[in-house]
Amino acid sequence: MVAVAGEALVDLVPAPVGGYLEIAPGGSPANVAVGLARLGVPARMLARLADDPLGHRMRAHLADNGVALDHTVAAVEQTSMALVTVDDDGVPSYDFRVDGTADWQWTDAELADALDGPVVAVHSGSLALTTAPGDGPLRALLERAAATATVSYDPNCRPLLMGDPAVVLEGVHALLAVADVVKVSSEDLEWLGLTPEAALEDWLTRGPAVVAITLGGDGVLAGTASGLRTRRPGVPVTVIDTVGAGDTFSAALLAGLHGRGLLGAAHRAELRALDGAVLDALLEFAARAAAITCSRRGADPPRAAELA
């Protein structure tokens, strides 16, 4: 299975009519877990879920989508919230309510058994890896996971909460040293002060086997540690909004690797030596999945049958 560690929060999103807000389950790692499960990959959520109405809704959402919750923590803190606005191009902006909430209070003890069982990959990213005090235990988990599992990482930058981009980039570089598969958006890189081309060449020298940079409607730029470089076009789609599109891409990329038996530390050499046809197929699959998410409201990743 693939374990996904990080925030499982609630988004308050614009309703289709009336100018009201409605509740939608969210959080980048939680979206990835749901995306994996919908594509038929056994997924374990490592999250701190509050014992409040919003936390109960989040728990039900994950369970209803087939995500394993046996390694979640019953948190005494409240559920984190994000207020979401969407511009005319469907691009979201976020305003967070996260002070002292459940997602950021991880301890090493709570993650002690996180890798038990047949865990072949661990994915994490976004706010959970940059928000104290829980970021330290989560980073330690990824370092520990690298001994037996593929480590997947998405910086998924949130400028409103992450502080100085230069400091964040130092933390990104530290995680690149343990990551095997990295997905990052061109928007993230712009905030970090990098171009996609420069980031691809630099990051592939820092440890990852595969780096994929999503370029919105312009597709994806990617490469491997063995020197392969490729660029695939975007998938034409009528965009409703792009909420969860990057998370869907990450989930589908991992699902493609899972289906090819390429996850797990024992397959690290194979992952670094992917050939061009396999890499292109993986990227095209992930891009199609992300496009489907863009074609409907909110973080609503596709199921396997929709991509068949």
Image (tube, rainbow, N blue to C red):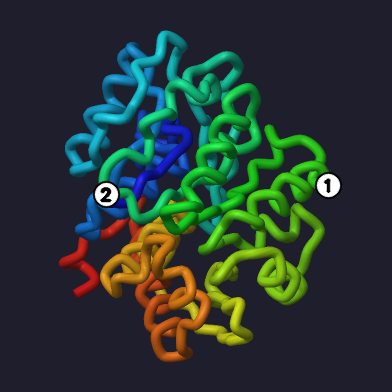
Residue 142 coordinates in the image, percent (x, y): 53, 44
Q: Is residue 198 left or right of residue 43?
A: right
At x 72% / y 45%, what residue is drawn?
171
* Residue 138 or residue 234, whichever sits in front: 138
- Asked where in the image residue 296 lies, by quadrant, the reply is bottom left
Q: Is residue 193 left or right of residue 182?
A: right
- In whole angstroms, how far apart are the C-alphas of marks 1 and 2? 37 Å
Q: Identity of the amino acid at label 2?
A: Pro
Q: Badge 2: few (under 14), some or many (20 or more) residues near its Cα, within 10 Å?
A: few
At x 43% / y 51%, what residue is drawn?
244
Question: Is residue 159 in view?
Answer: yes
Say which residue label 2 marks.
118
Q: Identity of the amino acid at label 1?
A: Ala
* Residue 90 or residue 206, whichever sits in front: 206
Given contact means CB atoms under 8 Å apart, are the residues at marks 1 and 2 in contact? no
115 lies above or below 136: below
Question: Is residue 20 in view?
Answer: no
295 lies above or below 101: below
Say which residue label 1 marks.
166
At x 33% / y 12%, what residue is drawn?
51
302 lies above or below 21: below
Residue 98 coordinates in the image, percent (x, y): 57, 22
At x 76% / y 50%, what residue is drawn?
169
Query: Residue most toward the top?
Result: 76
23 lies above or below 122: above
